Amino acid sequence: MLDRKTAPPVKLLSDRPFREPAYDTLKNGLPVYLLEGGTEEFVKVEVVVRAGSYHQHKPLVAYATANLLRYGTKGRSREEINEMLDFYGAFLHLDAQKDMISVGMFVLNKHLEPALDLLAEMLQEPAFSEDDMHSFLKNQQQVHLLNQKKVSHLARTYFNELIYGEDHPYGYRLKTPDFDKVERKDLIDFHTRYFHGGNAFILVAGRVPEDMAERLEQRFGRDDSPDPVSASSPGYPVISPGQRKVHLEVPYALQSAIRIGKQLFNRTHPSHHKLKITNALLGGYYGSRLMQNIRQDKGYTYGIGSNIISLVHSGYFFITSQVGADVREAALEEVYRELKALRTVPAEKREMEILKNYLSGSFLRSFDGPLAQKERFKELVMFGLDVSHYDEYLNTLKTITAEDIMECAGDYLHEDGMMEVVVGR
């Protein structure tokens, strides 16, 4: 009979659930990664450009360049593009981040040819209409003004400014006048400098046709790379303002948003895997210490968590939550108490078992299907890593001890080294 009183034994994942994609290179040097999988006859074609807000010389240029790709080309209007997407049942996804711009298209295989034609046209021949640009930026300016009333948004932007400095692209906090300073020439120059075969790669996932590389060669294989020096990544010094705590008073707010953390390193660092697991114990899942204490035991918040973020040129750790103004100080005290406990109180055997079991299952889910595997592989390409990176993570997860976690917390997450932002009452 089934014993429902005894939990099944913990069995950690030993092998990565990941098949390396096929690799090809177009004549202009553009790398192509083909990840076959799934049962439905569709693919996602994603062009990743190694340029984001880190590379722009003026705020909003990368974001506007990416989003205006769908507003029209030299041969098609925005309406025509939208009609084609609707007719072929294709879905376009544009994403501008700090280190990259991603342009992806989901499409059924039977409509792949016209979809690839449209994708190439949008990437290679954008119109960047003056009217469309001003309309887009004006709408985004209104969104920005609304965000200035959200304590969670303010806490995030002020925190990034605190740890990187107001002049660093990772820390710059948008200002309302920035939306009026972007010119069409800025977008054209940014596109010319970074949108070319020497500064991008293509990922294709799903039911990949056998001749996919040839189809991509026809659309994206032209030799259009500028002088490599002109497209090199800029360098920025990190100039922190010197203060360690910021409290922004928002009288109308019902809650206070909290961000506590520090600048660290990205996923290429030798201690990244240990730090990832250490962070999970602290606040990386529902059963974490922060959730157990501050939500379940104290009832100060509906949710609290922590995370580590990898950027190409840096990385950082943060704890985030929103709490009632009346319990703000008590919540902060408990957060720092848990940070201290992370390096002084070893996890019990059962706590370690639950943590490892959760992370093993979470890792497995993150590779579920070709689209998820594409995302994991994109991380490797962006950071210049290979698939052994995931093997190393599984080995670390299998062998890490409570003492290892305490040591890692002492090295990188000491409570005295944290910066703090509180926005609200």
Image (cartoon, helix red, strand yellow):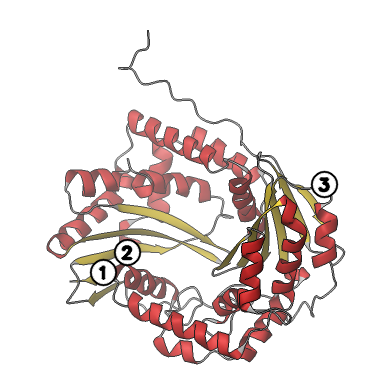
Question: Mark 3 or 1 closer to N-term?
Answer: 3
The reply to whether residue 103 is visible in this rendering is: no
Position of residue 85 relative to residue 232, above or below, is above
Q: Amino acid at mark 3?
A: Glu
- Counting the numbered discs, the total is 3
Position of residue 298 relative to residue 84, above or below, is above
Q: CA distance from mark 1 to mark 2?
A: 7 Å
Position of residue 48 relative to residue 74, above or below, is above
Q: Which residue is mark 3?
A: 210
- For label 2, the SS is strand
Question: Mark 3 or 2 closer to N-term?
Answer: 3
Question: Mark 1 or 2 closer to N-term?
Answer: 2
Image side of residue 369 versus residue 317, left or right: right
Q: CA distance from mark 3 to mark 1?
A: 54 Å
Name the mark nearer the viewer: 3 or 1: 3
Residue 314: percent from left, percent from top: 53, 65
Check residue 422 in the rendering and tell me which mark sits there, or answer none: 1
Q: Amino acid at mark 2?
A: Arg
- Toward the top, the furthest residue is 1
Pointer 1 with pointer 2, Cβ within 8 A: yes
Q: Which residue is mark 2?
A: 259
**Badge 2: how crowded within 10 Å, few (<14), some, or many (20+)?**
many
Name the mark nearer the viewer: 3 or 2: 3
